[in-house]
Amino acid sequence: MSEIPQLRHRRPPPNPAPPQPLLPTRLESLLPIENVSWDEAFEYCQAIGGRLPTENEWEYAARGGIADARYGDLDAVAWHRTNSAGTTHPVGLKQANSWGLFDMLGNVWEWTDSDYYDDAKVARGGSWTDLARFARASARYSFVPSYRLHSIGFRCVWELR
């Protein structure tokens, strides 16, 4: 399981990111959805029968059963400012955690369904634009729900029945 790649998103939200290096269409479709507001991420997850994770669920999944800040060597598990070459990367290229979850750290911040304060929502995990210290399971940041940024994406979760 990874961030939602653009290939899976039937109607991508506006994506006015800074110009990215040209990629073949197949690779481009494997980039994480970015420049998506919390509202759009929430609606997308609902439309496909899922939901956004709470921040506690997100951190539990990111850690993959270990207590460490990272589930492996930093450059093996995360895209961050130092190793990203200034761009997002296709999902699933870095080492998964022990539960098989890819891209929990770095690449794009991920919206959660948790409030930070007032009208802000919590995003977790750090991104390709951030210093390496933000690529850790406990990294959190707040954004207003309408905010879009080239380094914010999401993943959906489903209830087991």
Image (tube, rainbow, N blue to C red):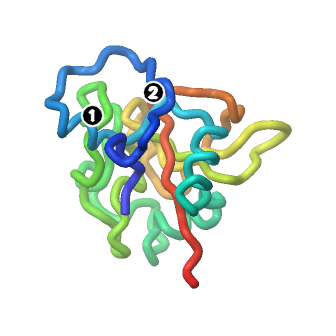
Q: Residue at x 41, y 51 (%)?
A: 3
Q: Where is residue 16? Give x, y as percent.
A: 45, 18
Between 17 and 87, the one nearer to me in the picture: 17
| Snapshot quadrant of residue 18 | top left
Please name which of the two marks, 2 or 1, marks the residue nearer to the observer. 2
Q: Quadrant of residue 129?
A: top left
Determine the CA span between mark 2 and mark 1: 14 Å
Q: Residue furthest top?
A: 19
Residue at the left extreme of this rendering: 24
The mark found on residue 150 in the picture is 2
Q: Is residue 74 visible?
A: no
Secondary structure beneath label 1: loop
Q: In the depicted view, which residue is nearer to us: 4 or 70? A: 4
Q: Quadrant of the C terminus?
A: bottom right
Screen quadrant of the N terminus: bottom left
Point 66% across, 39% down: residue: 39
Q: Earlier in the sequence, mark 2 or mark 1?
A: 1
- In depth, the one of 116 and 40 nearer the eye is 40
Q: Amino acid at mark 2?
A: His
Q: Which residue is mark 1?
A: 84
Horizontally, is 127 left or right of 49 in the view? left
Numbered tag placed on residue 62 in the rendering: none
